[in-house]
Image (cartoon, rainbow, N blue to C red):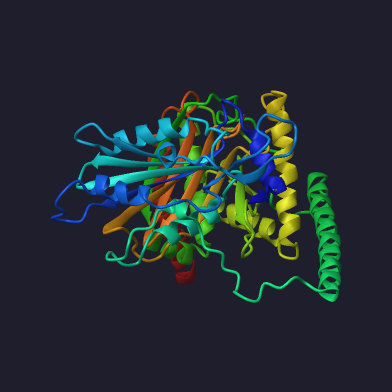
Protein backbone atom coordinates (compact mmCIF):
# COMPACT_ATOMS: atom_id res chain seq x y z
CA UNK A 1 0.00 0.00 0.00
CA UNK A 2 1.32 3.49 -0.85
CA UNK A 3 0.01 7.03 -0.70
CA UNK A 4 1.21 10.21 -2.33
CA UNK A 5 2.28 13.18 -0.24
CA UNK A 6 0.46 16.38 -1.10
CA UNK A 7 2.40 19.51 -2.03
CA UNK A 8 2.26 20.98 1.49
CA UNK A 9 3.53 17.70 2.98
CA UNK A 10 6.50 17.88 0.60
CA UNK A 11 7.08 21.52 1.55
CA UNK A 12 7.35 20.52 5.22
CA UNK A 13 9.90 17.84 4.30
CA UNK A 14 11.97 20.41 2.40
CA UNK A 15 11.97 22.79 5.39
CA UNK A 16 13.77 20.29 7.61
CA UNK A 17 17.44 20.42 8.47
CA UNK A 18 19.46 19.78 11.64
CA UNK A 19 18.54 23.16 13.15
CA UNK A 20 14.86 22.91 12.19
CA UNK A 21 13.32 19.51 13.02
CA UNK A 22 9.79 19.63 11.59
CA UNK A 23 8.08 17.79 14.44
CA UNK A 24 4.62 18.40 15.88
CA UNK A 25 3.72 16.75 19.17
CA UNK A 26 1.31 16.55 22.05
CA UNK A 27 2.18 16.41 25.73
CA UNK A 28 -0.75 14.89 27.63
CA UNK A 29 -0.95 14.59 31.42
CA UNK A 30 -3.11 11.94 33.13
CA UNK A 31 -4.18 11.08 36.67
CA UNK A 32 -3.41 7.51 37.75
CA UNK A 33 -6.61 5.79 39.02
CA UNK A 34 -6.82 5.98 42.80
CA UNK A 35 -6.03 2.79 44.72
CA UNK A 36 -4.58 1.16 41.58
CA UNK A 37 -2.46 -1.81 42.63
CA UNK A 38 0.72 -2.09 40.60
CA UNK A 39 2.59 0.17 38.20
CA UNK A 40 -0.15 1.72 36.06
CA UNK A 41 2.12 3.23 33.36
CA UNK A 42 3.99 -0.07 32.94
CA UNK A 43 0.76 -2.09 32.75
CA UNK A 44 -0.65 0.41 30.29
CA UNK A 45 2.45 0.18 28.10
CA UNK A 46 2.14 -3.62 27.89
CA UNK A 47 -1.41 -3.25 26.58
CA UNK A 48 -0.38 -0.59 24.08
CA UNK A 49 2.59 -2.49 22.67
CA UNK A 50 0.38 -5.44 21.76
CA UNK A 51 -1.67 -3.33 19.32
CA UNK A 52 -0.62 -3.27 15.67
CA UNK A 53 -0.22 0.07 13.86
CA UNK A 54 -2.44 1.26 11.04
CA UNK A 55 -1.79 3.96 8.41
CA UNK A 56 0.03 6.32 8.59
CA UNK A 57 1.87 4.79 11.57
CA UNK A 58 3.07 1.71 9.68
CA UNK A 59 4.20 3.76 6.66
CA UNK A 60 7.60 5.27 5.93
CA UNK A 61 8.98 7.45 3.18
CA UNK A 62 10.19 5.84 -0.02
CA UNK A 63 13.09 7.27 -2.04
CA UNK A 64 14.96 8.57 1.02
CA UNK A 65 18.30 8.23 -0.79
CA UNK A 66 17.18 9.18 -4.30
CA UNK A 67 16.03 12.29 -6.14
CA UNK A 68 12.58 10.84 -6.80
CA UNK A 69 9.59 12.35 -5.01
CA UNK A 70 8.83 10.22 -1.93
CA UNK A 71 5.55 8.45 -1.26
CA UNK A 72 4.24 6.73 1.86
CA UNK A 73 4.83 2.99 1.68
CA UNK A 74 4.24 0.19 4.20
CA UNK A 75 7.24 -0.57 6.41
CA UNK A 76 7.66 -4.32 6.09
CA UNK A 77 10.11 -4.42 9.02
CA UNK A 78 8.16 -2.30 11.48
CA UNK A 79 9.54 -2.43 15.05
CA UNK A 80 7.04 -1.29 17.69
CA UNK A 81 9.74 -1.16 20.39
CA UNK A 82 11.70 1.45 18.43
CA UNK A 83 8.73 3.80 18.27
CA UNK A 84 7.20 3.19 21.72
CA UNK A 85 9.44 4.11 24.65
CA UNK A 86 9.23 4.22 28.45
CA UNK A 87 10.81 7.01 30.51
CA UNK A 88 10.76 8.04 34.17
CA UNK A 89 11.28 11.45 35.75
CA UNK A 90 13.70 11.91 38.66
CA UNK A 91 11.94 12.22 42.01
CA UNK A 92 9.91 14.16 42.99
CA UNK A 93 8.83 14.52 39.33
CA UNK A 94 8.27 18.26 39.02
CA UNK A 95 6.47 19.80 36.03
CA UNK A 96 9.71 21.58 35.12
CA UNK A 97 11.40 18.17 34.77
CA UNK A 98 8.67 17.01 32.40
CA UNK A 99 8.97 20.16 30.27
CA UNK A 100 12.75 19.78 30.13
CA UNK A 101 12.38 16.20 28.91
CA UNK A 102 9.79 17.26 26.31
CA UNK A 103 12.15 20.03 25.15
CA UNK A 104 14.97 17.54 24.56
CA UNK A 105 12.73 15.01 22.82
CA UNK A 106 11.35 17.70 20.52
CA UNK A 107 14.87 18.81 19.53
CA UNK A 108 15.65 15.51 17.82
CA UNK A 109 15.06 14.72 14.16
CA UNK A 110 12.89 11.73 13.35
CA UNK A 111 14.59 8.91 11.45
CA UNK A 112 13.42 9.05 7.82
CA UNK A 113 14.32 5.37 7.36
CA UNK A 114 11.35 4.51 9.62
CA UNK A 115 7.73 5.66 10.08
CA UNK A 116 7.93 9.25 11.24
CA UNK A 117 6.59 9.09 14.80
CA UNK A 118 7.55 8.32 18.41
CA UNK A 119 5.51 7.72 21.55
CA UNK A 120 7.06 8.23 25.00
CA UNK A 121 5.20 7.08 28.12
CA UNK A 122 6.61 9.07 31.05
CA UNK A 123 6.03 8.01 34.66
CA UNK A 124 7.03 9.58 37.96
CA UNK A 125 5.15 12.90 37.65
CA UNK A 126 4.15 14.29 41.04
CA UNK A 127 0.56 14.28 42.34
CA UNK A 128 -0.01 10.67 41.20
CA UNK A 129 0.24 11.56 37.51
CA UNK A 130 1.98 10.34 34.38
CA UNK A 131 2.29 11.75 30.87
CA UNK A 132 2.80 10.81 27.31
CA UNK A 133 4.66 12.74 24.66
CA UNK A 134 3.84 11.77 21.08
CA UNK A 135 5.46 13.38 18.08
CA UNK A 136 4.99 13.03 14.35
CA UNK A 137 6.56 14.70 11.37
CA UNK A 138 4.49 17.66 10.15
CA UNK A 139 4.54 16.06 6.68
CA UNK A 140 2.28 13.33 8.10
CA UNK A 141 -0.24 15.34 10.10
CA UNK A 142 -1.57 18.83 10.83
CA UNK A 143 -3.13 20.31 13.97
CA UNK A 144 -6.71 19.23 13.34
CA UNK A 145 -5.48 15.79 12.29
CA UNK A 146 -3.69 15.54 15.62
CA UNK A 147 -6.86 16.45 17.53
CA UNK A 148 -8.81 13.85 15.53
CA UNK A 149 -6.13 11.29 16.39
CA UNK A 150 -6.32 12.13 20.10
CA UNK A 151 -10.12 11.93 20.17
CA UNK A 152 -9.93 8.53 18.47
CA UNK A 153 -7.51 6.96 20.96
CA UNK A 154 -9.02 8.48 24.11
CA UNK A 155 -12.43 7.53 25.46
CA UNK A 156 -15.39 9.18 27.17
CA UNK A 157 -15.57 6.33 29.69
CA UNK A 158 -12.94 5.04 32.10
CA UNK A 159 -14.11 1.44 31.73
CA UNK A 160 -13.49 1.33 27.95
CA UNK A 161 -10.59 -0.72 26.59
CA UNK A 162 -7.47 1.33 25.96
CA UNK A 163 -6.69 2.04 22.30
CA UNK A 164 -3.16 2.89 21.12
CA UNK A 165 -2.84 6.15 19.16
CA UNK A 166 -0.97 4.33 16.38
CA UNK A 167 -3.99 2.14 15.59
CA UNK A 168 -4.93 5.10 13.37
CA UNK A 169 -8.04 7.09 12.57
CA UNK A 170 -10.86 5.06 10.94
CA UNK A 171 -11.92 5.87 7.40
CA UNK A 172 -15.25 7.65 7.60
CA UNK A 173 -16.35 6.95 4.03
CA UNK A 174 -19.75 5.41 3.92
CA UNK A 175 -19.65 1.73 3.19
CA UNK A 176 -21.04 0.87 -0.19
CA UNK A 177 -20.61 -1.53 -3.06
CA UNK A 178 -17.01 -1.51 -4.27
CA UNK A 179 -17.72 -1.67 -7.96
CA UNK A 180 -15.47 -0.37 -10.70
CA UNK A 181 -16.81 2.92 -12.05
CA UNK A 182 -18.44 2.79 -15.45
CA UNK A 183 -17.50 4.95 -18.42
CA UNK A 184 -20.22 7.51 -17.65
CA UNK A 185 -19.08 7.81 -14.01
CA UNK A 186 -15.45 8.17 -15.09
CA UNK A 187 -16.37 10.91 -17.53
CA UNK A 188 -18.41 12.74 -14.88
CA UNK A 189 -15.54 12.59 -12.40
CA UNK A 190 -13.11 13.86 -15.03
CA UNK A 191 -15.34 16.84 -15.79
CA UNK A 192 -15.66 17.56 -12.04
CA UNK A 193 -11.89 17.36 -11.59
CA UNK A 194 -11.21 19.71 -14.50
CA UNK A 195 -13.79 22.15 -13.15
CA UNK A 196 -12.32 22.01 -9.66
CA UNK A 197 -8.80 22.58 -11.00
CA UNK A 198 -9.98 25.55 -13.05
CA UNK A 199 -11.65 27.12 -9.98
CA UNK A 200 -8.55 26.45 -7.88
CA UNK A 201 -6.35 28.30 -10.39
CA UNK A 202 -8.80 31.22 -10.54
CA UNK A 203 -9.04 31.40 -6.74
CA UNK A 204 -5.26 31.21 -6.35
CA UNK A 205 -4.81 34.05 -8.84
CA UNK A 206 -7.38 36.08 -6.89
CA UNK A 207 -5.48 35.50 -3.64
CA UNK A 208 -2.15 36.62 -5.10
CA UNK A 209 -3.78 39.63 -6.75
CA UNK A 210 -5.29 40.61 -3.41
CA UNK A 211 -1.89 40.40 -1.69
CA UNK A 212 -0.36 42.49 -4.46
CA UNK A 213 -3.02 45.20 -4.18
CA UNK A 214 -2.47 45.37 -0.42
CA UNK A 215 1.29 45.59 -0.87
CA UNK A 216 1.02 48.69 -3.12
CA UNK A 217 -1.65 50.28 -0.94
CA UNK A 218 -4.58 50.04 -3.38
CA UNK A 219 -6.53 47.60 -1.20
CA UNK A 220 -7.12 49.05 2.28
CA UNK A 221 -7.59 45.58 3.82
CA UNK A 222 -6.05 45.82 7.32
CA UNK A 223 -4.38 42.38 7.29
CA UNK A 224 -0.65 42.58 6.46
CA UNK A 225 1.03 40.90 3.51
CA UNK A 226 3.62 38.14 3.99
CA UNK A 227 7.28 39.24 4.21
CA UNK A 228 6.33 42.71 5.50
CA UNK A 229 7.23 42.00 9.14
CA UNK A 230 9.88 44.03 10.97
CA UNK A 231 13.08 42.44 12.19
CA UNK A 232 12.83 41.48 15.86
CA UNK A 233 14.71 39.55 18.54
CA UNK A 234 12.66 36.50 17.51
CA UNK A 235 13.74 36.63 13.86
CA UNK A 236 17.31 35.42 13.87
CA UNK A 237 19.05 32.20 12.75
CA UNK A 238 18.24 29.37 15.15
CA UNK A 239 19.86 26.19 16.41
CA UNK A 240 18.23 22.78 16.78
CA UNK A 241 17.94 22.94 20.58
CA UNK A 242 14.47 23.70 21.95
CA UNK A 243 12.90 25.02 25.14
CA UNK A 244 9.22 24.42 25.90
CA UNK A 245 6.91 26.30 28.27
CA UNK A 246 3.19 25.90 29.02
CA UNK A 247 0.33 27.85 30.52
CA UNK A 248 -3.28 26.84 31.23
CA UNK A 249 -6.07 29.43 31.21
CA UNK A 250 -9.81 29.19 31.78
CA UNK A 251 -11.72 28.93 28.50
CA UNK A 252 -14.88 30.23 30.21
CA UNK A 253 -13.01 33.35 31.34
CA UNK A 254 -11.64 33.92 27.82
CA UNK A 255 -15.15 33.55 26.34
CA UNK A 256 -16.52 36.03 28.88
CA UNK A 257 -13.80 38.53 28.00
CA UNK A 258 -14.64 38.04 24.32
CA UNK A 259 -18.31 38.84 24.90
CA UNK A 260 -17.48 41.89 27.01
CA UNK A 261 -14.99 43.18 24.44
CA UNK A 262 -17.07 42.19 21.38
CA UNK A 263 -14.21 39.98 20.20
CA UNK A 264 -13.80 36.34 19.20
CA UNK A 265 -11.99 33.81 21.38
CA UNK A 266 -9.25 33.68 18.75
CA UNK A 267 -8.84 37.48 18.87
CA UNK A 268 -8.55 37.36 22.68
CA UNK A 269 -5.88 34.64 22.35
CA UNK A 270 -3.95 36.77 19.86
CA UNK A 271 -4.32 39.83 22.11
CA UNK A 272 -2.97 37.90 25.12
CA UNK A 273 0.03 36.78 23.06
CA UNK A 274 0.50 40.29 21.68
CA UNK A 275 0.44 41.84 25.15
CA UNK A 276 2.93 39.26 26.42
CA UNK A 277 5.32 39.74 23.50
CA UNK A 278 5.12 43.54 23.83
CA UNK A 279 5.97 43.39 27.54
CA UNK A 280 8.79 40.89 26.97
CA UNK A 281 10.36 43.03 24.23
CA UNK A 282 10.01 46.19 26.35
CA UNK A 283 11.88 44.37 29.14
CA UNK A 284 14.68 43.67 26.67
CA UNK A 285 14.65 47.19 25.23
CA UNK A 286 13.92 45.61 21.86
CA UNK A 287 10.36 46.60 20.87
CA UNK A 288 10.25 47.39 17.12
CA UNK A 289 8.57 50.65 16.10
CA UNK A 290 6.54 48.66 13.56
CA UNK A 291 4.07 46.04 14.84
CA UNK A 292 4.91 42.36 14.85
CA UNK A 293 2.81 40.25 12.53
CA UNK A 294 1.70 36.68 13.14
CA UNK A 295 1.19 33.78 10.79
CA UNK A 296 -2.07 32.13 11.88
CA UNK A 297 -2.79 28.62 10.52
CA UNK A 298 -6.40 28.02 9.45
CA UNK A 299 -7.81 24.54 8.90
CA UNK A 300 -9.45 23.75 5.55
CA UNK A 301 -9.77 20.06 6.46
CA UNK A 302 -12.02 17.89 4.30
CA UNK A 303 -13.36 14.47 5.23
CA UNK A 304 -11.18 11.50 4.14
CA UNK A 305 -8.35 13.69 2.85
CA UNK A 306 -4.96 12.76 4.29
CA UNK A 307 -1.94 14.91 5.04
CA UNK A 308 -1.86 18.63 5.73
CA UNK A 309 -5.02 20.61 5.01
CA UNK A 310 -4.21 24.07 6.27
CA UNK A 311 -3.58 27.55 4.98
CA UNK A 312 -2.30 30.67 6.71
CA UNK A 313 -3.64 34.16 7.31
CA UNK A 314 -1.43 37.06 8.34
CA UNK A 315 -2.55 39.05 11.40
CA UNK A 316 -1.42 42.40 12.74
CA UNK A 317 -0.53 41.97 16.45
CA UNK A 318 -0.46 45.76 17.04
CA UNK A 319 2.51 45.40 19.44
CA UNK A 320 3.40 49.06 18.76
CA UNK A 321 0.09 50.18 20.32
CA UNK A 322 0.32 50.82 24.09
CA UNK A 323 -3.45 50.87 24.76
CA UNK A 324 -4.80 47.37 25.38
CA UNK A 325 -8.32 47.87 23.97
CA UNK A 326 -7.09 49.75 20.90
CA UNK A 327 -4.65 46.89 20.31
CA UNK A 328 -7.45 44.33 20.63
CA UNK A 329 -9.58 46.26 18.14
CA UNK A 330 -6.74 46.42 15.61
CA UNK A 331 -6.15 42.69 15.96
CA UNK A 332 -9.87 41.97 15.44
CA UNK A 333 -10.04 44.12 12.29
CA UNK A 334 -6.93 42.46 10.89
CA UNK A 335 -8.12 38.87 11.45
CA UNK A 336 -11.60 39.65 10.12
CA UNK A 337 -10.18 41.11 6.91
CA UNK A 338 -7.73 38.21 6.55
CA UNK A 339 -10.44 35.57 6.94
CA UNK A 340 -12.73 37.42 4.50
CA UNK A 341 -10.09 36.76 1.87
CA UNK A 342 -10.78 33.02 2.28
CA UNK A 343 -14.59 33.16 2.21
CA UNK A 344 -15.07 32.46 -1.52
CA UNK A 345 -11.87 30.51 -2.05
CA UNK A 346 -11.71 26.73 -2.47
CA UNK A 347 -9.87 24.59 0.07
CA UNK A 348 -7.41 23.46 -2.63
CA UNK A 349 -6.58 27.06 -3.56
CA UNK A 350 -6.08 28.00 0.09
CA UNK A 351 -3.80 25.01 0.65
CA UNK A 352 -1.79 25.71 -2.49
CA UNK A 353 -1.33 29.31 -1.36
CA UNK A 354 0.22 27.93 1.84
CA UNK A 355 2.39 25.58 -0.25
CA UNK A 356 3.83 28.48 -2.23
CA UNK A 357 4.46 30.54 0.90
CA UNK A 358 6.20 27.59 2.58
CA UNK A 359 8.14 26.96 -0.63
CA UNK A 360 9.55 30.49 -0.55
CA UNK A 361 10.50 30.06 3.11
CA UNK A 362 12.13 26.70 2.33
CA UNK A 363 14.25 28.22 -0.46
CA UNK A 364 15.36 31.09 1.80
CA UNK A 365 16.30 28.59 4.52
CA UNK A 366 18.21 26.31 2.19
CA UNK A 367 20.17 29.28 0.81
CA UNK A 368 20.71 30.67 4.33
CA UNK A 369 19.06 33.95 3.30
CA UNK A 370 16.55 34.18 6.15
CA UNK A 371 18.84 36.53 8.10
CA UNK A 372 18.96 39.15 5.32
CA UNK A 373 15.35 39.10 4.09
CA UNK A 374 12.25 40.44 5.88
CA UNK A 375 10.55 37.71 7.92
CA UNK A 376 7.47 36.10 6.37
CA UNK A 377 6.02 36.63 9.86
CA UNK A 378 7.55 37.32 13.26
CA UNK A 379 5.78 34.48 15.07
CA UNK A 380 3.31 31.70 14.38
CA UNK A 381 0.24 31.62 16.65
CA UNK A 382 -2.23 28.78 16.23
CA UNK A 383 -5.49 28.10 18.09
CA UNK A 384 -6.86 24.58 17.62
CA UNK A 385 -10.26 23.55 19.06
CA UNK A 386 -9.96 20.34 21.05
CA UNK A 387 -12.20 17.92 22.97
CA UNK A 388 -14.91 19.57 25.09
CA UNK A 389 -15.69 16.57 27.32
CA UNK A 390 -13.45 14.75 29.85
CA UNK A 391 -11.47 11.93 28.25
CA UNK A 392 -9.74 8.79 29.53
CA UNK A 393 -6.73 6.74 28.48
CA UNK A 394 -7.47 3.34 29.88
CA UNK A 395 -8.78 4.21 33.35
CA UNK A 396 -6.59 7.34 33.59
CA UNK A 397 -8.36 10.69 33.27
CA UNK A 398 -6.81 13.30 30.98
CA UNK A 399 -5.93 16.36 33.09
CA UNK A 400 -4.27 18.63 30.53
CA UNK A 401 -2.86 18.61 27.03
CA UNK A 402 -0.28 20.94 25.50
CA UNK A 403 0.81 21.22 21.85
CA UNK A 404 4.44 21.36 20.70
CA UNK A 405 4.97 22.79 17.24
CA UNK A 406 7.57 23.66 14.61
CA UNK A 407 10.17 26.41 14.37
CA UNK A 408 11.69 27.55 11.10
CA UNK A 409 15.00 29.32 10.61
CA UNK A 410 14.53 33.02 11.26
CA UNK A 411 11.50 32.44 13.49
CA UNK A 412 12.49 31.33 16.98
CA UNK A 413 9.06 31.27 18.67
CA UNK A 414 5.84 29.38 18.03
CA UNK A 415 2.73 29.61 20.23
CA UNK A 416 0.10 26.92 19.74
CA UNK A 417 -3.09 26.68 21.80
CA UNK A 418 -5.42 23.69 22.22
CA UNK A 419 -8.68 23.71 24.15
CA UNK A 420 -9.78 20.85 26.41
CA UNK A 421 -13.01 21.04 28.44
CA UNK A 422 -12.83 24.42 30.19
CA UNK A 423 -9.12 24.94 29.66
CA UNK A 424 -6.90 26.53 27.05
CA UNK A 425 -3.49 24.89 26.96
CA UNK A 426 -0.79 27.23 25.61
CA UNK A 427 2.34 25.51 24.30
CA UNK A 428 5.26 27.89 23.69
CA UNK A 429 8.08 26.38 21.63
CA UNK A 430 11.28 28.41 21.37
CA UNK A 431 14.86 28.11 20.24
CA UNK A 432 16.80 27.43 23.44
CA UNK A 433 19.71 29.65 22.39
CA UNK A 434 17.71 32.72 21.30
CA UNK A 435 14.72 32.65 23.72
CA UNK A 436 16.06 30.75 26.76
CA UNK A 437 13.53 32.39 29.09
CA UNK A 438 10.38 31.54 27.11
CA UNK A 439 8.67 30.73 30.44
CA UNK A 440 8.56 34.49 31.10
CA UNK A 441 6.46 34.99 27.96
CA UNK A 442 4.13 32.23 29.21
CA UNK A 443 3.71 34.07 32.52
CA UNK A 444 3.08 37.35 30.68
CA UNK A 445 0.29 35.69 28.67
CA UNK A 446 -1.49 34.95 31.94
CA UNK A 447 -0.99 38.47 33.31
CA UNK A 448 -2.25 39.97 30.02
CA UNK A 449 -5.75 38.83 31.09
CA UNK A 450 -5.70 41.50 33.80
CA UNK A 451 -4.72 44.11 31.20
CA UNK A 452 -7.80 43.26 29.10
CA UNK A 453 -10.04 43.23 32.18
CA UNK A 454 -8.68 46.62 33.14
CA UNK A 455 -9.22 47.94 29.63
CA UNK A 456 -12.85 46.75 29.64
CA UNK A 457 -13.42 48.31 33.07
CA UNK A 458 -12.03 51.69 31.98
CA UNK A 459 -14.04 51.61 28.75
CA UNK A 460 -17.27 50.90 30.63
CA UNK A 461 -16.47 53.55 33.23
CA UNK A 462 -15.90 56.18 30.54
CA UNK A 463 -19.15 55.22 28.80
CA UNK A 464 -21.02 55.48 32.10
CA UNK A 465 -19.55 58.93 32.80
CA UNK A 466 -20.43 60.05 29.27
CA UNK A 467 -24.03 58.91 29.68
CA UNK A 468 -24.32 60.77 33.02
CA UNK A 469 -23.24 64.00 31.32
Residue at x-position 58% and y-position 34%: 112
Task: Classify residue 341 by image quadrant.
Answer: bottom right
135 over 460 or under it: above or below:
above
Q: Is residue 386 left or right of residue 204?
A: left
Q: Is residue 282 left or right of residue 225?
A: left
343 over 278 or under it: above or below:
below
Residue at x-position 71% and y-position 60%: 347
x, y percent for residue 234: 56, 31
Q: Nearer the viewer, residue 73 or 350?
A: 73
Q: Is residue 448 visible?
A: no
x, y percent for residue 40: 23, 49
Q: Is residue 238 left or right of residue 250?
A: right
x, y percent for residue 317: 58, 46
x, y percent for residue 183: 85, 73
Residue extending furthest toward the front: 76
Task: Classify residue 88 by image quadrant.
Answer: top left
Q: Nearer the viewer, residue 103 or 160?
A: 160
Q: Is residue 131 visible?
A: yes
Q: Give the mark count.
A: 0
70 over 210 or under it: above or below:
above
Amino acid sequence: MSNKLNALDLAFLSLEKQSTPVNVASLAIFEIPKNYKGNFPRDLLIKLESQLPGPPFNQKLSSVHSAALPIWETDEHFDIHYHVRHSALPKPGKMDDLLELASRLHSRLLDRERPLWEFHLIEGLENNQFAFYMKMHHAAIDGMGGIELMENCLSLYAQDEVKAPWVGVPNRRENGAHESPGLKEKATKLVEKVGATSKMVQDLSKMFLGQGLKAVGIDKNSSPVPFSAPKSIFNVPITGSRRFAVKSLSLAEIKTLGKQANATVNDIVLALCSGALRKYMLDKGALPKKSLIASVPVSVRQVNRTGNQITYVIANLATNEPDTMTRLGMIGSSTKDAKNELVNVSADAATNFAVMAQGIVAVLNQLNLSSITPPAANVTISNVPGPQKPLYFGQAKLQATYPLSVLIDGQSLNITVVSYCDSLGFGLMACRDTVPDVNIIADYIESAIDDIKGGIYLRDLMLEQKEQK
